Each structure stands twice: as structure tokens, then as C-alpha cells.
Amino acid sequence: MNQANFADIHRNFPGGLLAYSRQTIQRIKSNDPRVIQVHIDNILSQDEDDAESFANALRGNNHLKYVCFGNDDYDSDHIDFVLSALTETKVIEIGIWPLAASSNTSRRVVCSNYYAMRIGETIKLMPMINKLGFRGCSLGSATAISLAENLAGNKTLEHIDLSGNAIGDDGAIAFAIALRTNNTLKELVLDDNQLSVSGQRALRNSIYDDSSFDALEDSNHTIQSFFSSSPRSVFGKAVMNDCFHSLAANLRSRSKKEAVTKKIHRYLRKKHRVKLQHQSFLCMQIAVMPHLLGFISTRCDVETMRDIIRHMPHLLEMGGKQNGADELNEQLGLLKI
């Protein structure tokens, strides 16, 4: 979304920004198909009548797709007028203009955080919204927590850009919790957000929780990326490989069951040294096999089942081996199949 060139506005409109604003409002009100994006800073003034006129123009507009808020200090009621009107449009993307270093004043930071919170509270009423762009807005952990709470039950958002903010570990943990119940978000961009190991682990566990088979199945199998260009600005070495593998499993799977299967492959191989091909389950007791087969038959894809059946004669001939399988045996024995 490009900010309007103010020099062009003053050159082309004798009345300057006011004339530009009024003409834009009229074009939005008339449902002009050429107006598909608007920067709120160029339209909204401190006058309540102008704010209401703009909100009324938005209602029922079928062509506007992209809306960007600035970070100037506008009356909260005026912002609410606009957000309420946007619920009656077909807007698919809402953003906040990034804070430039020269304008990164404390008041603008407060405004950006307030606007982001209000947008987050309103998205549940927007039937077509699928993207939020909050890059470089100095958003803090409280704002991130508020956004995450509104994300949890959302059914339309697919992309949220929070890169270059300061959501910290508390914000990351809040989003990790939200991802346990959200099944539509595909990208949550978190580059450069000051995350430590605890925040990184929370995100990793949201997509690959290896505390148990059930926890692994209950992880998020939809999200495909946590970064735009720099994975090292989000994850450290301790969780990097698990995150890469799990995000790739989500991306390349056609169903939740397929994604779960790929993660179970990794879980068994990494944590219990069990492979689902070639010399399968040689470290396990025969008594454990029904539990694992029952689990896989109800929760994994057909290819995994075929792979196990193909090696079944070999497993029976070997009779199973008991090489440090107590932890796995105990865990599988407690499964409610």
C-alpha cells in the first residue's frame, strides 16, 4: 500500500489535502471500481463530520480491498467510526503505516499500539479479511497478546506481518497458545522481535509438541512460516531444525493426517530411535506393537500403514528387541486408542 504523494495532492488540488480528501470520499461513496486502496491519514481529519462522512462512504463499498491506518493522533471515536464501517465492506487487508525513525515519538508508538488493538478486536466482524500488516510499528507484548486472543477463533486470517516490532517472549507465547486452536493462519511473520529461548520454544511447541503422541497430534498443522527472510532472527539453534521440519510438513501436506504422520516419523526417529521403514521397531517389545499399530491406524495416512504391513513378517521373525524401550513402552501403554 503506497502512501499518497502530498506534493502531487497540493499541485493537482487547489484546496490541497482537504480537496483531495473530499474527492476521495466521494469516489468511495460512489463505489468507484478504481479505488481499491486508501491510506486513512490522507482522508481522516480531526473534524467529526468529516470522520462520519468518510465512515458512511465506506459502508457498502464493494471495491475497496486495502486500508492502511497512519500513526497520527486521531480521536478514538473517529477510528471506531471507520472500523465499524469496514465491517460492511469487502476489505481483505488492513495495515498500519510503519514508524519512521525520525517520527518514532512516544505518542505515535501509543497510537500504533492502540490502533492495532482496535483492529484486532474488529477483525472477527470482517467476513473477508485475510491479512494484517503491522511491520515496524513498535508494537509491544500487550498489543501482541490482544491480537493473539482475537486470532484464536478467527476463521479468515491467513497472513499477519509483525516483523520489526517488540512483542517479546510474552507475545510469542500468546501467539503459540492461539495457534493451538487456529486452523486458518498460514504465515505469522515475526522477524526481529527480540525473542529469547522461551518464546522460541513456545512457537516450536505450537507446531511440534513432542511431549506425547496426543500433544503432537494436537499441535498446529496449518501454519507454514514464522519468518519472511531471516529465520535466524526468529529461531536459535535449539529449535531451528524442529521448526523447519514441522513447517515443511505443514506446507507439503494435503491434510492434517498427512502432516501428523510426517511429524510422527520425526518424533519416533529422533526421540525413540524408531524408524518406519527398513528395520522398523527393532528396539520395541512385541507387546507394544498393538498399541502403536492401533494409534497409527486411526491417526496416520495410508502410506504409513502400508509401510508397516510391508515389514510385518520381518518384525515377527526378529521377535522384537528390548533395547531401552521402557519410556516408549510406558507412553504407548497409556494411550487411549
Image (spheres, rainbow, N blue to C red):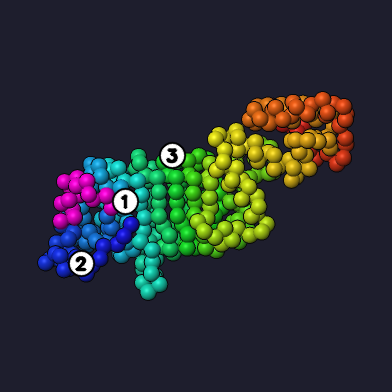
Identity of the residue drawn at 75% across and 35% down: 277
- Which image quadrant for residue 2? bottom left
> Which residue has dot 1 on it?
66
> Seen in the image, is 319 located left or right of residue 42?
right
Query: Which quadrant of the rendered structure holds the N terminus?
Result: bottom left
Q: Is mark 1 on a helix, strand or loop?
A: strand
- Residue 73 location (% of width, % of height): 30, 64
Circles 3 and 2 in contact, beta carbons < 8 Å: no
Q: Is residue 24 magenta?
A: yes
Residue 8's label in the rendered image is: 2
> Seen in the image, is 269 located left or right of residue 86?
right
Residue 155's label in the rendered image is: 3
Query: Residue pushed farthest bottom?
Result: 102
Q: Is mark 3 on a helix, strand or loop?
A: loop
Mark 2 neighbour density, 10 Å: few (under 14) some (14–19) many (20 or more):
few
Identity of the residue drawn at 47% across and 63% down: 164
Q: What are the residue bounds of the magenta stretch?
A: 23-37
